[in-house]
Amino acid sequence: MTEHDAEPTAQRDQAHSGTGDDVARHGTGRDTARPETGRDAGRPGTDQDTDQDTGQNTGQDNGAQVSTGSETAGVPEAAIPELVIISGMSGAGRSTAAKCLEDLGWFVVDNLPPALIPTMVELGARSQGNVARIAVVVDVRGRRFFDNLRESLADLDTRGVTRRIVFLESSDEALVRRFESVRRPHPLQGDGRIVDGIAAERELLRELRGDADLVIDTSSLNVHELRAKMDAQFAGEEEPELRATVMSFGFKYGLPVDADLVADMRFLPNPHWVPELRPYTGLNEEVAAYVFNQPGAKEFLDRYAELLRLIAAGYRREGKRYVTIAIGCTGGKHRSVAMSEKLAARLAAEGVETVVVHRDMGRE
């Protein structure tokens, strides 16, 4: 790895509308339901990983009885989730690997105590197929829990749970360089040097590395190359999905800070100056018809959609999974709203999971 985790995500602005129609979702013909998740599940203390590992809230119940597979009452064998355990050296790219699986639809849990892994699998089995694939990041940050990993793996094997171990490896030189670049200590170095912490971690992980199903050496890999390796192993024949947010906004309220692409609709006549259209928004059929009857409106939609197809293909190749497309006009009420709706429908029809947000509609 030559760069650290900084995977951009498209943030959703809360729409301001009194009508409740300001956020519309466009289906893609694909089941995109995913469980609600939160961050930093199972963290016993401060995150010391230079990857800035993040995961999902597990909703742990420490009092749950651990049982999976055929021993789980009422749960068919086919309902047992697939399990991947991500581990390896601190700074070697665990969080990048975890985020890649999350983008591929896996339910990801960061730094879960190993003793709770069978419980997590059981909860997935009870989800009636909603949690079919679980990835758990296990590392030495929870050192007093780490000793339970061998017992948990044996328990899973006994119950017939399909599991794989992905181990992220890197050279001492690369790890030292990464820790120094972010000016953070190694979680095991204590009062010693970074190399002392790395040596201690290698010794703790030696047996787990020997049991790994997949070992990836990231010494000379950057973030995009590591994501490509994970995609090759876990994406199957499906192309990684791209998710788009199409956001209308008003220039007079400022540019959206999370926009990846911005288009300006102020080259079209403003319906605000048509008295009978002024009270309505771009969601109104008459307003939309007025906008798209103007010279250049339909041509813009066709050519911009074509340009986005080219950009989307490049984003997928580079491992970018989220994009925010901002469409602006003066007040974010008429032209940008109408164009955003049409553009989002085009993207959805082409298989892009799309959400449209009207940031400033209703502010006037």
Image: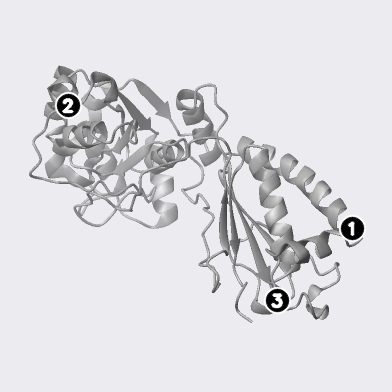
**Sequence-first tag of 1 and 3:** 1
Q: Which residue is mark 1?
A: 296
Callout 1 touching callout 2 (CB < 8 Å):
no
User: Would residue 220 be visible to someone looking at this image?
Assistant: no
Residue 172's image quarter?
top left
* The C terminus lies in quadrant: bottom right
Answer few, some or many: residues within 10 Å of disc 3's Cα (few below 14, many 20 plus, some between 14 and 19).
Answer: many
Residue 201 left/right relative to 238: left
In terms of secondary structure, where does tag 2 sit?
loop
Judging from the image, the colouring scheme is one colour
Residue 44 left/right relative to 65: right
Q: As displayed, is residue 208 above or below residue 182?
A: above
Amino acid type, label 3 = Gly
Residue 166 place in picture, x, y as percent: 35, 28
Residue 273 left/right relative to 115: right
Which residue is pictured at 80% across the width and 52% down the height? 301
Residue 147 place in picture, x, y as percent: 12, 35
Checking the image for residue 137, the label placed there is: none
Residue 356 left/right relative to 165: right
Q: Which residue is mark 3?
A: 331
Answer few, some or many: residues within 10 Å of disc 2's Cα (few below 14, many 20 plus, some between 14 and 19).
Answer: few
Amino acid type, label 2 = Gly
Q: Which residue is mark 2?
A: 74
Which residue is pictured at 12% across the width and 22% down the height? 71
In terms of secondary structure, where does tag 3 sit?
loop
**Sequence-first tag of 3 and 2:** 2
